[in-house]
Image (cartoon, rainbow, N blue to C red):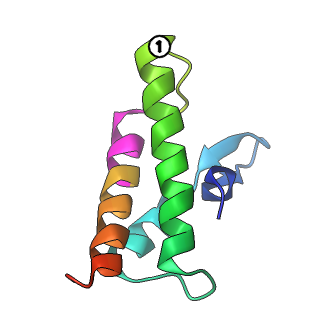
Amino acid sequence: MRADDFFVLDDRSERVLNQGVLVDLIADPLPLASDASVAYGLLDLVHDELVAYGTNGSNKLDDKEIGLALQALEAVIWRLLGCR
């Protein structure tokens, strides 16, 4: 997966974070993607957002959304490690 895969178009055709898929990932793996692939995409998303926030403020996610992305990444990593 890629970082862009975690975004959808809203009713105004603007890209927004698909929070539903992140909530789903916290509980269970996605049926059509491996946790390893998901972790790679989430790590890319989180990295890009935090670098943008820390350098020039061009981040797209608000505090709640980046928190949700971090929770999903943590859950996926724990599953990959076999700890959950």
Amino acid type at mark 1: Thr
Compared to residue 57, the image places residue 25 above or below, namely: below
Identity of the residue drawn at 40% across and 67% down: 23
Q: Can residue 39 be seen in this view?
A: yes
The residue carrying pointer 1 sits among few (fewer than 14), some (14 to 19) or many (20 or more) residues within 10 Å by Cα, namely few
Q: Label 1: which residue?
A: 55
Q: Where is residue 44 in the image (x, y as percent from the top left)?
A: 54, 47
Compared to residue 32, the image places residue 15 above or below, namely: above
| Residue closer to the observer: 80 or 54 | 80
Relative horizontal placement of residue 23, taking residue 45 as reference (left or right): left
Relative horizontal placement of residue 5, taking residue 66 as reference (left or right): right
Residue range (magenta): 62-68
Q: Is the magenta stretch mostly helix, strand or loop?
A: helix
Identity of the residue drawn at 48% across and 77% down: 35
Identity of the residue drawn at 33% across and 69% down: 77
Compared to residue 32, the image places residue 76 above or below, namely: above
